Image: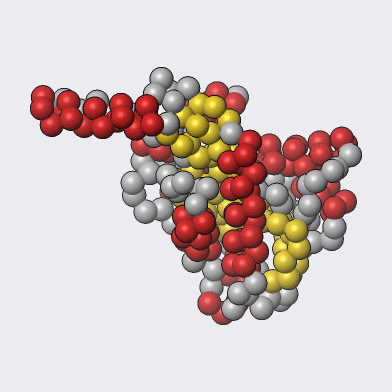
Amino acid sequence: WMLGIVSVLCLVTLTGCTVVSYRKNTEFEGYFDSPKTVALVEPDINMYKLTAGGVDEFNAQWTAASKVLVSQRIKQELENYRSIKTAYMEANNLAEDDQDILDQQAGMFFVVSNSIITHTYLPESSFPHKIKHFDYTMGKEVSALQKFGSADTYLFCSGRNYIWTAGRATLATFGLLVGAATGVTIIIPAGPEWIVAALVDAHTGNVIWFNYIPMPGDMREEKVVDRVIRSLFKSFPEKWR
């Protein structure tokens, strides 16, 4: 099933030049009319080096740095809302069973995100009624995260980012030059890059709000992360500030 998800995300990349909007269920507009505690689950951001041959190599150092930037920027964003009390779910030095709980919920969010992108964003597979009647859920099993601290809502964030090597960048430039000379352009795929964020009710598992950005840019860069997070959360109503 992971291969299927990756294939879908590759398609997302191809449609990533258009502006996409957030998704919400019927609870969203009034969700923070009363104060709530939102626990930020450690972002599932993976950074890869993408070689000239199309081989992706996971980079732990880039990944760790990006997670820190994304976490900090989301915290700053949520502090703008008077109805939101922010908590952070630390994932360091956990017992194996506890880490399994976090991994299971992160995996479930990845699967649900894939379904949301497939059926509410991709033109070739989306269904208008799934957008109008947005009713996705992670299930009540998400309440297992209460073990790490009481919360009304969980904020999940997931993304994949690919940084080209010099060799791949050179190959892309060559493809453009060939296209200019012959009229046949060689397209060098950028990699299935994307980032999503969602508010999930801690008791029901319902996805209250979901936003998606394809091709976010180099998530190692603070200015890029700042732009991306601001864009993700711009759909929050001003009345919550």
Query: Which quarter of the picture shows residue 187?
Result: top left
Which residue occupies the extreme top position in the image?
53
Residue sitting nearer the eye, 63 or 88: 63
Q: Tell me: 206 left or right of 120.
A: right
The C terminus: image quadrant: bottom right
> Residue 118 location in percent, x, y?
48, 39
Which residue is pictured at 50% across the width and 26% down the height? Answer: 56
Tell me if I can see residue 137 in this picture: no
Which residue is pictured at 70% across the width and 57% down the height? Answer: 40
Which residue is pictured at 80% across the width and 46% down the height? Answer: 92
> Residue 161 location in percent, x, y?
50, 40
Q: Tell me: 65 left or right of 194.
A: right
> Residue 198 location in percent, x, y?
61, 54
Tell me if I can see residue 164 in this picture: yes
Residue 144 against residue 39 in the figure, above or below: above
Which residue occupies the extreme front position in the image?
166
Which residue is pictured at 21% across the width and 32% down the height? Answer: 176
> Residue 11 location in percent, x, y?
41, 33
Residue sitting nearer the eye, 23 or 156: 156
Query: Which quarter of the picture shows residue 110?
Result: top right
Q: How many marks?
A: 0
The N terminus: image quadrant: top right
Residue 153 against residue 220 in the figure, above or below: below
Residue sitting nearer the eye, 210 or 82: 82
Query: Which quarter of the picture shows residue 105?
Result: top right
Q: Tell me: 161 left or right of 171.
A: right
